[in-house]
Amino acid sequence: MSGFVTRFAPSPTGLLHLGHGFSAMTAWEAAKSAGGTCLLRIEDTDATRVRPEYEAAIYEDLAWLGLTWPEPVWRQSDRLDVYAAALDRLGRLGLTYPCRCTRADIRAAVAAPQEGAGPGSAVYPGTCRGRVLAEAGQGEAIRLDLSRALALLDGPALTWTETGPAHAGTHALDPGAMRREIGDVVLARKDIGAAAYHLSVVVDDAAQGITHVVRGEDLLDATPIHRLLQALLELPVPVWHHHALVRDAGGKRLAKRDDARAIREYRKAGLTPEDVRRLAHTLRADEPR
Ligand code: GLU
């Protein structure tokens, strides 16, 4: 067995569709050809959307596709204390602040021309920046102060390796682009103690010894923030491979609610796992559209 460890990390908030199947198969094939391992990880921190029957369906559909994984499978809802410790560490570095803005507040602020980020941008305008953690109320989000984080790491650029078809090469963190396009991301929600996606992924990839992150191109933009969090938390840095997405005939990427493309629908219709594999490969676009 080589040192190659990757993972497939679905959220049990819907049925796996063809795109998930393709992502899983890509990760498993990468592990197989490297003589390594592919883990399965259940990303179930969004308690409002997670359902146990979807988790059961993940195991069933992946097994039907012929994939196997080492046990035990990690479930992120079992690890909230670990994410809370990582969040504390960033807090002690002075890099987090509580935010009580609603989506409507943020939309209104970014629509104001002097706020910088521009209309329609999802970049948080920084309204709550400067508030202290001690005044965080129930239900407030905890955000990363991106500018402070970048300033703390002032030094040689942070780099990473990408091997996916559309973006292969060495990439370096671009602080200006991050400020413009990413901004102060949410790391956690105070009431449920749950970490948001970026923090839990980075913490778990390190804890599980993931050497290669294989995932869809829809997550490409998350990579700089993951690389930054790894530097701040002094975690090892994997190689990333963002694969092309499976799209419908109109070129739109598949959504969770696209139940017609659910793997179990194909199965019910009498397709074999091999048919599903072929179909996913046919629908995949090698270039992002
Ligand atoms: N849980 C994420 C999703 O369902 C994937 C996380 C990742 O691969 O980094 O899209």
Image (spheres, rainbow, N blue to C red):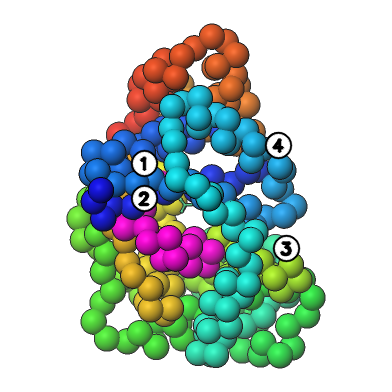
Mark drawn on residue 5: none
Q: Mark 1 sits on what residue?
A: 27
Pick whichever of labels 4 and 1 is earlier in the sequence. 1
Inter-mark Cα distance, 3 to 4:
33 Å
Residue 39: percent from left, percent from top = 43, 48
Q: Is residue 212 magenta?
A: yes
Q: Residue at x 71, y 42 (%)?
A: 52
Q: Residues within 10 Å of mark 4 (few under 14, many from 20)?
A: few
**Looking at the rendering, which quadrant does residue 47 occupy?**
bottom right
Q: Amino acid at mark 1?
A: Ala
Q: Amino acid at mark 4?
A: Glu
Q: Mark 2 sits on what residue?
A: 6
Q: Mark 4 sits on what residue?
A: 53
Q: Residue furthest left?
A: 169
Q: Amino acid at mark 3?
A: Ala
Q: Which residues are magenta?
A: 199-215
Query: Is the residue under label 4 in contact with that under label 3 (CB below 8 Å)?
Result: no
Pick whichever of labels 2 and 1 is earlier in the sequence. 2
Helix, strand or loop at mark 1 = helix
Mark drawn on residue 104: 3
Pick whichever of labels 3 and 2 is earlier in the sequence. 2
Query: Is the residue under label 2 in contact with that under label 3 (CB below 8 Å)?
Result: no
Q: Residue at x 42, y 57 (%)?
A: 221
- Image vertical order of residue 266 relative to residue 8, above or below: above
